[in-house]
Amino acid sequence: MDKKIKLYNRLAVFVLFIGFPLLFWGVDDVPKRSILKETLSVLTLLSFSFMLLEFYLIRSTRFLFKEHTRSNVLKWHKAIGYIFVSILLLHPFFVVLPRYVEAGVDPVDAFVTMVTTVDSLGVLLGLIAWFLLLLIGLTSFFRKQLPFSYKTWRIVHGLLAIVFIVIASWHALTLGRHMHKLLALFVLLIGGMGVFFVLKMYFTTRTKKA
């Protein structure tokens, strides 16, 4: 029975965080571009979806993964975080990468123009989200070297994650090529529930201590 439940959990995660994003990308009526551009778009979309999954691999969602040990859930949280944070940090470069095989603006010039266009709300949000993601990655990787306790780091980590996901979602909703109504609803619903679970974990901990 436990094996079946674990299988169902994995299947649900696969459908929700991989299947749905791919389905929404597939039914999008935006004209498809080159294989390289669409591959990078799908990679970015799935990476963002897995960042949403991170909000569910925490203590306050134990009821979702009760057949898995806490250490295993934590291992998945770390592995997914390191892999997909690294991929999303490359997102600005993915935007200009296809220009190396296309005629037109020089890729370096395109990149400089993109990251310095701070009068565009969407671009500005993207830059802020990128730096927040970098901060999350660095403070996670060097956690043991930071001058504060694990409990303090965990709170800071969670708050940074919430701010990141809000700003990154705003950025995606503003500039995302494939961000149509269904995908936008998915991001808002899954992201909103994830933020709720993180806040619930913190408030529950404080209530118990009080």
Image (cartoon, rainbow, N blue to C red):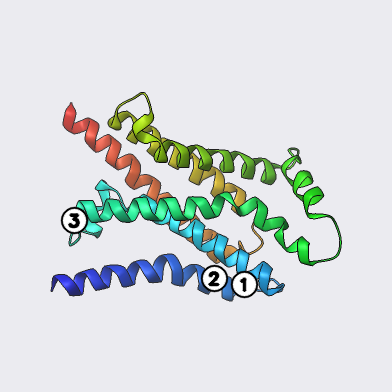
Above or below for 162 versus 4: above
Q: Label 1 near label 2: C-beta < 8 Å?
A: yes
Say whether disc 3 or disc 1 marks the residue closer to the N-terminus: 1
Is 3 on the left or on the right of 53, as rendered? left
Q: In the structure shown, which secondary structural element does the residue marked by tag 1 occupy?
A: loop
Residue placed most toward the observer, 3 or 189: 3
* C-alpha separation, residue under disc 2 versus residue under disc 1: 6 Å
The x, y position of residue 42, in whole percent, is 57, 67
Camera-near label (3 vs 1) is: 3
Q: Residue at x 50, y 37 (%)?
A: 135
Q: Residue furthest top?
A: 147
> Can residue 162 be seen?
no
Residue placed most toward the observer, 139 or 31: 139
Q: What residue is pinned by disc 3?
A: 69
Total count of labels: 3
Q: Label 3 near label 2: C-beta < 8 Å?
A: no
* C-alpha separation, residue under disc 3 versus residue under disc 1: 38 Å
Other-residue count near label 2 (Cα within 10 Å), few / some / many at <14 / 14–19 / ≥20: some
The x, y position of residue 4, in whole percent, is 19, 75
Residue placed most toward the observer, 7 or 93: 93
Q: What residue is pinned by disc 2?
A: 24
Residue type at tag 2: Phe
Q: What residue is pinned by disc 1?
A: 28
Q: Residue at x 32, y 29 (%)?
A: 152
Other-residue count near label 3 (Cα within 10 Å), few / some / many at <14 / 14–19 / ≥20: few
Is 135 on the left or on the right of 81, as rendered? right
Quadrant where the N terminus lies?
A: bottom left
Say whether disc 2 or disc 3 marks the residue closer to the N-terminus: 2
Q: Residue at x 21, y 32 (%)?
A: 207
Q: Residue at x 58, y 76 (%)?
A: 27
